[in-house]
Image: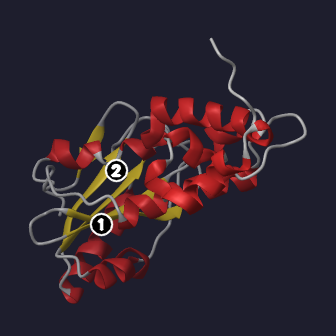
Amino acid sequence: MTKRRRIHELPSFDRPREKLRRKGAAALSDFELIEVVIGNGTASADVSQIARQIQKLLQKSAATLGYEALTELHGVSVANAGKLLAALELAKRHLIKDTEPLRTMADIVARLDDIRTKQQEYLVALSLDGGQRLIAHRTITIGTLDTVLAHPREVFADAIVDRAASVVVAHNHPGGDPTPSQPDITLSQQLVAAGQLLGVPLRDHIIVSKTSYFSFRQHHLL
């Protein structure tokens, strides 16, 4: 098998950044795009070596990619991990359009896989249009091992800008039991009241764990 040459060994016209300038981003392979985002290697790892590791990780688990997984790779700094995650998030928000409506509980829960295994409680909000299609998926706040605090204004501020027709709020229970606590119930009641006042109803509040979930709507708590 032919060994891949390092970037500095390639002719200048064939280096990823130069190729992007001449031919556009669509002409680059996934590997080359990662090289462009990373920019430079380190004293111990060439940018091509770093990009190869990241490419394998993306192919394996792009949906749950985070700082921890990236910075465990040899040569990946916190700064480079941040660049890559920011690029992925921008693409998700502005280029990847969800056209399938989230009609069933299974459709919604599938969108929450990224918080199921978090070691802290993450509160996220899904803004939905009138056809129940996803407009945006945002992390509202990150709490501790067993507590996540939020104010209704934090949940609805972006949903109003999105012109959302409804909102689904969800958070994870790292301990494994999705049964709601009294603060979870209080938060749901506050969100229902705020949604009615703002004209952006709370469609559901869902608590997920690694293996199960709890829906406030299914349990008639909304």
Front residue of 60/2: it is 2
Residue type, numbered disc 1: Ser
Image coords of residue 200 (percent x, y): 20, 79
Q: Nearer the viewer, residue 51 or 183?
A: 51
Q: Residue at x 65, y 16 (%)?
A: 2
53 vs 201, left or right, is right
Q: Residue furthest top?
A: 1
Q: Quadrant of the C terminus?
A: bottom left
Indicate the quadrant containing the N terminus: top left, top right, bottom left or bottom right. top right
- Answer with left or right where residue 120 lies relative to residue 197: right
Question: What is the residue that sits farthest to the right in this orientation?
Answer: 43
> Residue lying furthest bottom in this view?
197
* Residue 61 seen in the current view: yes
Q: How far apart are the alpha carbons under marks 2 and 1?
A: 10 Å
Q: Residue 85 falls in which quadrant of the image? A: bottom right
| Image side of residue 8 versus residue 205, left or right | right
Q: Which residue is denoted by mark 1 in the rendering?
A: 188
The image's mark for residue 180 is 2
Q: Regarding mark 2 in the picture, which secondary structure is present there?
A: loop
User: Counting other residues with Cα less than 10 Å from the Cα at mark 1, is it few (<14), some (14-19), or many (20 or more)?
Assistant: many
Using the image as rendered, state which of residue 47 and residue 147 is in the foreground. Answer: 47
Q: Residue at x 15, y 50 (%)?
A: 219
> How many other residues sit within 10 Å of disc 2, few (<14), some (14-19) or many (≥20)?
some
Residue 166 placed where, x, y %? Answer: 19, 72
Above or below: residue 26 compared with residue 128: above
Residue under the point 75% across and 34% down: 6
In the displayed structure, 118 sits above or below 153; it is: above
**Given contact means CB atoms under 8 Å apart, are the residues at marks 2 and 1 in contact?**
yes
> Residue 199: x and y, percent?
18, 85
